[in-house]
Image (spheres, rainbow, N blue to C red):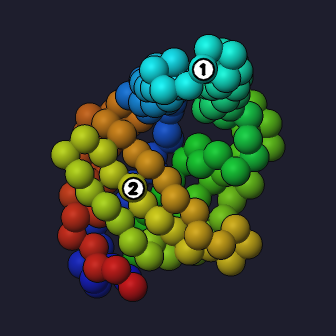
Amino acid sequence: MISTRSPKPLDLRLKPSNWLSAYFIALHCIVVASGFLALPLFVALALSWLAAMSLLYYLISYFGFLRRRTVIRLIFAENHWRIYMGARHGTVSMIDRVECVSRVVLPFGMLLRFKTISAGILSVPILPDSLDKEQYRRLRCLVNFTRES
């Protein structure tokens, strides 16, 4: 719920974050390195093959916005959030009137959790390179000063 003094509307078009892809790569590299340190060679090679396939899947699905449940646009207007989901080059569906049930604001990013009727709880990570600097600043100010419903 937002106070009656609502800020200006936001229309945020999310783009792929290089920081999040670096996180994917680092996490998978740590798993492979720890596997080679702690497991026999054959098991470590099998683990590295699985980690490589997992990394490839996450990077392709993230940068290509291939999944239908990928959030590609967030709109805040008239004290309500709207979410547009879909593939980057495909059909886009709108979820109207979602509630922001929780938010985590850290110096290096944000995590917004929305309650939807059809999709349940939807978590949206937003890092600084996902938006323009001004849009990220406005979203951060909005999220910092909103109350949880």
Residue located farthest toward the front when viewing the structure as drawn:
40
- Residue of label 1: 40
Q: Amino acid at mark 1?
A: Pro
CA–CA distance in space, label 1 to label 2:
38 Å
Q: In this image, 125 relative to 47: left or right?
A: left
Q: Nearer the viewer, residue 68 or 43?
A: 43
Circle nearer the N terminus (1, 2): 1
Work out which quarter of the rendered image holds the C terminus and state it: bottom left
> Element at badge 2?
strand
- Does the image show residue 20? yes
Q: Height in image: 111 above or below 116?
A: above
Residue 135 in picture, x, y percent from top left: 32, 43
Q: Residue at x 26, y 34 (%)?
A: 133
Seen at 64% across and 46% down, the residue is 70
Position of residue 93 measured from the top left corner of the image (x, y, whole percent): 74, 54
Q: Nearer the viewer, residue 24 or 117?
A: 24
The image quadrant that residue 91 belongs to is top right
Residue neighbourhood size for the residue with mark 1, other residues' Cα within 10 Å, grouped as few (<14), some (14–19), many (≥20): few
Q: Amino acid at mark 2?
A: Leu
Q: Is residue 25 visible?
A: no
Q: Position of residue 81 (x, y in %)?
A: 49, 67
Q: For mark 2, what is the residue?
A: 111
Image: 18 above or below 111? above
Q: Does 5 sit above or below residue 103? A: below
Is 114 left or right of 46, judged from the image as shown? left
Quarter of the image for residue 115 reads bottom right
In the rendered structure, the answer to whether residue 14 lies left or right of residue 129 reads right
State the residue lying farthest toward the right: 91
